[in-house]
């Protein structure tokens, strides 16, 4: 599935992986997100509810461009830098090209939308 993240004039195309957690995220779309910087490594936004993580790996080491769900805090994470292996992190997909603009300081209002084929 293809998603778009839109923040002002910036648009990022994301490719969502198939899995229970990704499908559960799709059920919440469209979403308005309040993206905030976390540790100068990722943008995070809290979701309205927990996502299904049944059968998901117990964690992984994210790369720049990854879209993930952090189960302990019920938040989405969009990494603009790589990070160490983190328990509770579920990979959902990745930004297809260009992560420019995600590293800027401060909060960012955004929309996460399903792109129809």
Image: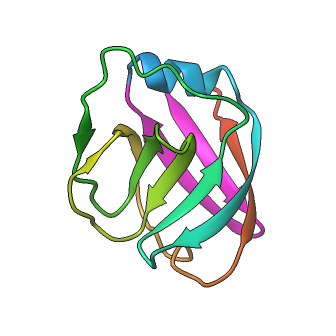
Name the spot of residue 35 as percent of width and height, x first: 66, 62
Q: Is residue 13 left or right of residue 29?
A: left
Report which quarter residue 11 is drawn in.
Answer: bottom right
Instruction: Please state which of residues 103 and 10 is positioned toward the viewer in this rendering.
Output: 103
Residue visible at 52% across and 34% down?
A: 2
| Secondary structure, magenta segment, majority class | strand
Does the rendering let one see residue 95? no
**Looking at this rendering, what residue extends furthest in the bottom direction?**
105
Name the spot of residue 93 as percent of width and height, x first: 39, 40
Q: Is residue 12 magenta?
A: yes
Instruction: Please state which of residues 65 and 44 is positioned toward the viewer in this rendering.
Output: 44
Above or below, 97 against 17 in this view is below
Report which quarter residue 7 is drawn in.
Answer: bottom right
Does the rendering let one see residue 10? yes
Q: Is residue 15 left or right of residue 106?
A: left
Residue visible at 43% across and 44% down?
A: 68
Above or below, 84 against 2 in this view is below
Name the spot of residue 76 as percent of width and height, x first: 54, 47
Q: Which segment is the magenta one?
A: 1-17
* Colour setup of the view: rainbow
Residue visible at 49% across and 75% down?
A: 100
Name the spot of residue 37 as percent of width and height, x first: 57, 72
Instruction: Please state which of residues 93 and 98 is positioned toward the viewer in this rendering.
Output: 93
Quadrant of the snapshot with the C terminus: top right
Q: Is residue 37 magenta?
A: no
Residue visible at 27% across and 59% down?
A: 63
Q: How many marks?
A: 0
């Amino acid at each position: 599935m293809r998603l778009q993240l839109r923040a002002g004039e910036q648009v990022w195309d994301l490719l969502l992986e198939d899995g229970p957690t990704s499908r559960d995220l799709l059920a919440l779309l469209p979403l308005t997100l309040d993206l905030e910087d976390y540790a100068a490594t990722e943008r995070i936004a809290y979701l309205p509810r927990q996502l299904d993580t049944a059968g998901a790996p117990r964690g992984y080491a994210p790369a720049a461009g990854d879209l993930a769900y952090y189960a302990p805090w019920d938040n989405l994470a969009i990494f603009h830098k790589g990070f160490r292996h983190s328990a509770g992190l579920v990979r959902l997909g990745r930004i297809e090209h260009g992560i420019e603009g995600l590293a800027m300081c401060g909060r960012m209002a955004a929309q996460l939308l399903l792109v129809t084929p």
